[in-house]
């Protein structure tokens, strides 16, 4: 049995390699039009080979008492692709059957691409069994996405006139880290294929590739392994091991639903003559907003004349940014509370005790987020009256612009104004907002709202000479406070080092320009004062490193490398250290 399975696995690996080569050639090269006629032969042969192999695997599994869920699902899916393409070709018949099938080949092409993604998710499951360190796997997954993205963006079909390696790596890392800093124009320098690659990168980077792959693997394996559940529990910060994979499914479905709803609102906010590909434009910006990526298909971002005064679209983008910046956990906790509250009010079912449904983490996150958004809006309303707000003639327009600046500063990266037009106080306050960033377990970056809240509360706790931070009837764990100050210290060291290096490599820029750029990179914001494309190659590598570290968190990497599993059974004598 095992020998036959081993041979079948080798055959499967061979088919996967053929599939990869075909997909890369098919999507990535645009200068071989004379060979495209062979697709009508290669595509069906490849699909039939995959069907035959999965049929063989299903027979083997059934023979040994296994239900063969994975090959059965693959068989159904691949067969559906063929039937759907044939039916589509027949209903849209214009020439010969062969020509009609060739014109409908995109069904098989994109279907095989999705099939490959599911295969990749199952491969990742094998990685769990070989090596289990959640922090290292988390960091490694982002590194892998960035490298694969770099390779895809280097393909001839991804760009209009080609792209250098450093610019491809910069763009891929910026998308993976959901930053939004760009060195080439996303709208003009990338083709539809290249823009799609960027969109997939910040979707994976926002929610996490391992979240998506676990989502697919869960369905294709009808469950989750113990190691996989442990891993996702660590990544998601879930309290209980049970229900972890159900939470993964909820996160993916919730996120895709919010993005789809946002795309609809953006779509109807645009006139057909405003953009050429209105549907793709809406989907791209909805995902970019929810993932706090900041990439745009307009060369000037939302500052473009067609979108600058489109307040309905801006409010839609802001809502998506806030949802993504809060994270699924907060939305789920609030929804859970509201659901039980409605049931109690209307006496539906058994009355539930809801006093403790809203977690302390949710309260801190929502209150801190609200304070920062309101504070930023009020500050910009006063500081920017003579600058960015001047061209907006209505009070609603001024409020929307100030609010958008406050919301987007906290890791989103979209701009409805020219960042160089801000006053110095406005830029400094925006740097402060960027440094704080979004909330934990969200699509945003920064030191996080809870970190800032705990550090602020700790000041008053120390002043009162209290041993613990207490909020209501709850005491904050000392480990959380220590972690918060470690994150703050690390962030300042990385940001300070980045500013010094950029001042050395690009002395022609001012301190405020470079500081703004580095804070934006570390907090994965993506706002810039217009210097990103003019950075030297050395500075680009520095920004790449800062964006990557800002997304994964250096503390996560250090914990993965340095954490000791065994705990010491002794304590040294305590001694005080002078602070002031």
Image (cartoon, helix red, strand yellow):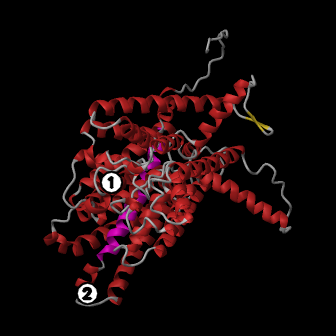
| Number of residue marks | 2
The answer to if 116 sits in the magenta stretch is yes
User: On the image, numbered disc 1 is attached to which residue?
Assistant: 13
Residue 113 visible, this orientation: yes
At a point 48% along the width and 30% down the height, the residue shown is: 492
553 left or right of 193 in image: right
Which label belongs to residue 208? none
Expressed as whole percent of the image width and height from the top left, the position of residue 55 reads: 40, 67
Q: Earlier in the sequence, mark 2 or mark 1?
A: 1
500 left or right of 215 in image: left
Which label belongs to residue 97? 2
* Spatial separation of the CA atoms under disc 2 and disc 1: 33 Å
Disc 2 element: helix
Expressed as whole percent of the image width and height from the top left, the position of residue 277 reads: 36, 73
Q: Which residues are magenta?
A: 105-131
Determine whether 165 is above or below 344 in the image.
Answer: above
Q: Between residues 306 and 150, which one lies in front from this camera angle?
A: 306
Q: Between residues 352 and 77, which one lies in front from this camera angle?
A: 352
Q: Badge 1: few (under 14), some or many (20 or more) residues near its Cα, within 10 Å?
A: few
Determine whether 176 is above or below 513 in the image.
Answer: below
The answer to if 457 sits in the magenta stretch is no
Which corner quadrant holds the C terminus?
top right
User: Nearer the viewer's eye, disc 2 or disc 1?
Assistant: 2
At a point 55% along the width and 56% down the height, the residue shown is: 403
Determine whether 490 is above or below 281 in the image.
Answer: above
Disc 1 element: helix
């Amino acid at each position: 049995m095992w020998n036959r399975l081993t041979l079948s696995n080798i055959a499967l690996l061979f088919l996967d390699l053929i599939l990869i080569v075909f997909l890369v050639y098919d999507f990535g090269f645009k200068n071989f039009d004379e060979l495209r006629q062979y697709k009508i032969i290669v595509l069906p042969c490849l699909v039939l080979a995959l069907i035959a192999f999965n049929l063989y695997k299903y027979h083997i599994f059934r023979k040994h008492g296994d239900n063969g869920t994975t090959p059965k699902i693959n068989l159904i899916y691949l067969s559906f692709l063929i039937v759907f393409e044939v039916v589509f070709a027949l209903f849209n018949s214009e020439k010969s059957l062969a020509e009609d099938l060739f014109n409908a080949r995109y069904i098989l092409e994109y279907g095989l691409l999705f099939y490959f993604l599911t295969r990749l998710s199952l491969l990742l499951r094998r990685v769990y069994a070989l090596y289990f360190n959640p922090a290292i796997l988390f960091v490694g997954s982002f590194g892998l996405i960035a490298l694969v993205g770099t390779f895809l963006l280097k393909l001839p079909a991804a760009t209009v006139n080609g792209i250098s390696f450093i610019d491809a790596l910069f763009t891929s890392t910026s998308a993976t880290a959901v930053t939004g800093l760009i060195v080439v124009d996303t709208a003009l320098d990338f083709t539809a294929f290249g823009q799609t690659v960027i969109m997939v990168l910040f979707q994976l980077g926002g929610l996490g590739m391992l979240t998506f792959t676990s989502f697919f693997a869960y369905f294709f394996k009808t469950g989750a392994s113990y190691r996989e559940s442990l891993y996702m529990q660590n990544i998601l910060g879930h309290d209980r091991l049970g229900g972890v994979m159900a939470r993964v499914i909820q996160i993916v479905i919730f996120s895709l639903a919010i993005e789809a709803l946002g795309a609809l609102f953006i779509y109807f906010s645009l006139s057909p003559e405003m953009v050429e590909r209105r549907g793709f434009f809406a989907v791209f910006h909805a995902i970019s907003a929810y993932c706090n990526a900041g990439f745009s298909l307009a060369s000037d971002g939302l500052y473009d004349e067609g979108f600058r005064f489109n307040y309905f679209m801006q409010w839609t983008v802001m809502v998506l940014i806030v949802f993504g910046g809060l994270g699924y956990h907060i939305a789920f906790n609030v929804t859970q509370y509201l659901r039980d509250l409605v049931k109690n009010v209307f006496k539906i079912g058994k009355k539930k005790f809801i006093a403790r449904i809203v977690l302390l983490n949710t309260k801190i996150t929502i209150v801190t987020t609200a304070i920062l958004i309101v504070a930023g809006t009020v500050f910009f309303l006063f500081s920017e009256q003579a600058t960015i707000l001047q061209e907006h003639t209505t009070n609603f327009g001024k409020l929307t612009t100030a609010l958008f600046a406050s919301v987007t500063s906290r890791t989103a990266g979209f701009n409805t104004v020219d960042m160089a037009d801000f006053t110095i106080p406005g830029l400094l306050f925006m740097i402060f907002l960027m440094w704080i960033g979004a909330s934990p377990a969200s699509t945003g970056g920064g030191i996080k709202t809870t970190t800032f809240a705990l550090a602020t509360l700790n000041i008053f706790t120390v002043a009162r000479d209290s041993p613990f931070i207490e909020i209501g009837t709850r005491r904050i764990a000392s480990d959380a406070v220590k972690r918060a100050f470690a994150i703050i210290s690390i962030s300042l060291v990385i940001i300070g080092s980045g500013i010094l290096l950029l001042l050395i490599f690009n002395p022609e820029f001012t301190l405020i320009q470079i500081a703004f750029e580095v804070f934006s990179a570390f907090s994965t914001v993506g706002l810039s004062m217009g210097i990103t494309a003019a950075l030297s190659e050395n500075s680009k590598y520095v920004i790449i490193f800062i964006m990557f570290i800002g997304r994964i968190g250096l503390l996560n990497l250090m914990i993965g490398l340095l954490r000791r599993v065994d705990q010491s059974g002794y304590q040294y004598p305590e001694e005080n250290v002078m602070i002031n």
